[in-house]
Amino acid sequence: MAYMAGLVASDGTLSSANFYRVKIITSNRNFANLITDLFKRINANPRIYSYNGRKFEVYCYNKELWWKLHVRFQIPCGRKSALIHPPRDLKFAESLSFLRGLLDGDSSIFILKTILRREQSSYSYLMPRIAYKSKSPEIVLWSLELLKELRMTPYLANDVKAYRWHLDGLPNMRKFYTRLGYMHPEKNLRLKHILMLGRGQAYYIHIRPPEKERVTAHPPRLGAPKIDGPKRAAETPGHPADAGWR
């Protein structure tokens, strides 16, 4: 139930109390099937509506489920992106399940390619990243602190449109995989691919002697609204051995 609540909080919607409709939208067919199975396990009688095979809406009408999501997990009706609050009075395992649902819905996982230029050498290195953003500062800080309890090192990042944290580096990817992980098929596959790359591939490659010393990183950082909470300095890589596949 906690996982489904996190998924509804990120990619779902609760209708008004007159209809008791619970809806989750995804662009991944396999994930839509997984969500359908989750609904069936609680006897929610789900249905799937496909938008030309590009987007899938999994929904059900269930009063009991609707009330649990709305009352126990504090998920508001209708548009809710800025109104989501962290659930209260959950056991630690339930909090992890709720977070897993949130990240299956709203996080992204990818690899950054960064160029580091020095006087005598130029390097290209790869840095894996999981990013999560929300318009709710409370849910961003709650999820960040929960990852820290799992011995990971996320940090607040700049974004002009939302609140965001990043989780960088191969050690963090390993911890995320073993201690939390993805249920979303596509994101889980990307995470496994990153872990396989980290086994044998050099994390930095010598390119050529640069014209002058300078550091560039992609993508560029943007300004952001202020969030009260732990912060980390802007990402400016040092020597290649100190960055990338850390």
Image (cartoon, rainbow, N blue to C red):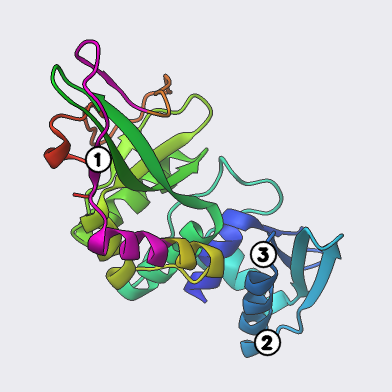
Q: Name the spot of residue 50 as percent of width and height, x first.
A: 83, 65
Residue at the right extreme of this rendering: 52
The residue segment tinted magenta is 191-217
Residue 163 sits in quarter: top left
Question: Position of 209 compared to 56: left or right?
Answer: left
Residue 148 sits in quarter: bottom left
Precedes in sequence: disc 3 or disc 2: 3
For mark 1, what is the residue?
205
- In the rendered structure, which amino acid carries the disc numbered 1? Ile
For mark 2, what is the residue?
40
Residue 243 sits in quarter: top left
Q: Is residue 204 magenta?
A: yes
For mark 3, what is the residue?
28
The answer to which of 96 and 25 lies nearer the viewer is: 25
Q: Is residue 182 magenta?
A: no
- In the rendered structure, which amino acid carries the disc numbered 2? Lys
Q: Residue at x 76, y 70 (%)?
A: 59
Q: Name the spot of residue 119 as percent of width and height, x first.
A: 14, 16
- The answer to whether any part of residue 104 appears in the image is yes
Precedes in sequence: disc 1 or disc 3: 3
Q: Residues within 10 Å of mark 2 (few under 14, many from 20)?
A: some
Q: Are marks 3 and 2 in contact (CB under 8 Å)?
A: no
Residue at the top extreme of this rendering: 212
